[in-house]
Amino acid sequence: MSVLDADIEEIVVSADQIDDRIAELAKEIDADYDDREPVLVGILKGAAMFMSDLARALERPTRMEFMAVSSYGSGTQSSGVVRILKDLDFDIAGEHVLIVEDIIDSGLTLSWLLKNLQARDPASISIVTLLRKPDAVKVHIDVNYVGFDIPSEFVVGYGLDYAEKYRDLPYIGRLSPAVYGG
Ligand code: PRP
């Protein structure tokens, strides 16, 4: 139990559901990559938990790299203007890149990231996201692996924050609107 649990209105994806789904995703990825060794590119900070659990669930060896980007916008909405806060310190040319995201909401961050990483000439780029919201479907991005499709509600936990809090909750929960004045 965390003192933060009291701010959660409802659990959307439980810790057990996350564990089980990651095991399934890892199996799929292991099978699809065959003899290729993927470079996992985790998008900080949200993907930190998912990245570390997914990497451990995969049987094949992977390289773990991170990028941090910020999509301008405040509170609970992203704007689509993206800025690199921490770039890769590894040349992905000729590599099989697997972008690891915690959530696709508007899809704007990911469509920008895809263009940016594609320009670096990798052998392939695939995407795995733990969560996807309905709006993401409007953006034409091929998402190879999706953990859960969730409703368009403001969720936190398992890497996702509100004002830098709640990332350490072991589940995904709907934040009580009272917390963010909604
Ligand atoms: C979140 C999330 C994605 C992005 C998705 O990151 O991790 O990168 O927003 O939103 P979009 O599909 O509408 O573009 P955020 O900018 O909140 O940073 P954080 O991971 O450091 O919390």
Image (tube, helix red, strand yellow):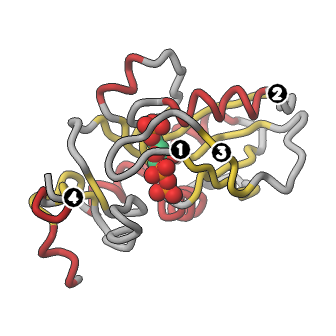
Question: Splitting the image into 4 quarters, where does residue 36 fall?
Answer: top right
Where residue 71 appears, x then y in whole percent?
Answer: 53, 44
Q: In this rendering, which labeled residue sits more in front, label 2 or label 1? A: 1
State the residue position of label 4.
173
Q: Amino acid at mark 2?
A: Ala
Q: Which residue shows up at 32% across the image and 34% down it? A: 133
Q: Amino acid at mark 1?
A: Ser
Q: Circle 2: is it few (<14), some (14-19), or many (20+) Cα within 10 Å?
A: few
State the residue position of label 3.
83
Q: Secondary structure beneath disc 4?
A: strand
Question: Taking 74 as reference, is 122 left or right?
Answer: right
Q: Amino acid at mark 4?
A: Gly
Question: Splitting the image into 4 quarters, where does residue 114 fall?
Answer: top right
Q: Is mark 1 within 8 Å of ligand 1?
A: yes
Label 2 to label 4, Cα distance in Å?
36 Å
Q: In this rendering, which labeled residue sits more in front, label 3 or label 2? A: 3
Marks 4 & 1, CB-CB < 8 Å contact = no
**Disc number for residue 126:** none
- Mark positioned earlier in the residue sequence (4 or 1): 1
Q: Circle 3: is it few (<14), some (14-19), or many (20+) Cα within 10 Å?
A: some
**Disc number for residue 71:** 1
- Is any atom of residue 104 visible in this view? no
Q: Secondary structure beneath disc 2?
A: loop
Count up the numbered dots: 4
Q: Nearer the viewer, residue 136 or 74?
A: 74
Q: In this rendering, which labeled residue sits more in front, label 4 or label 3? A: 3
Q: Which residue shows up at 21% across the image and 58% down it? A: 173
Label 4 to label 3, Cα distance in Å?
28 Å
Marks 3 & 2, CB-CB < 8 Å contact = no
- Mark positioned earlier in the residue sequence (2 or 1): 1
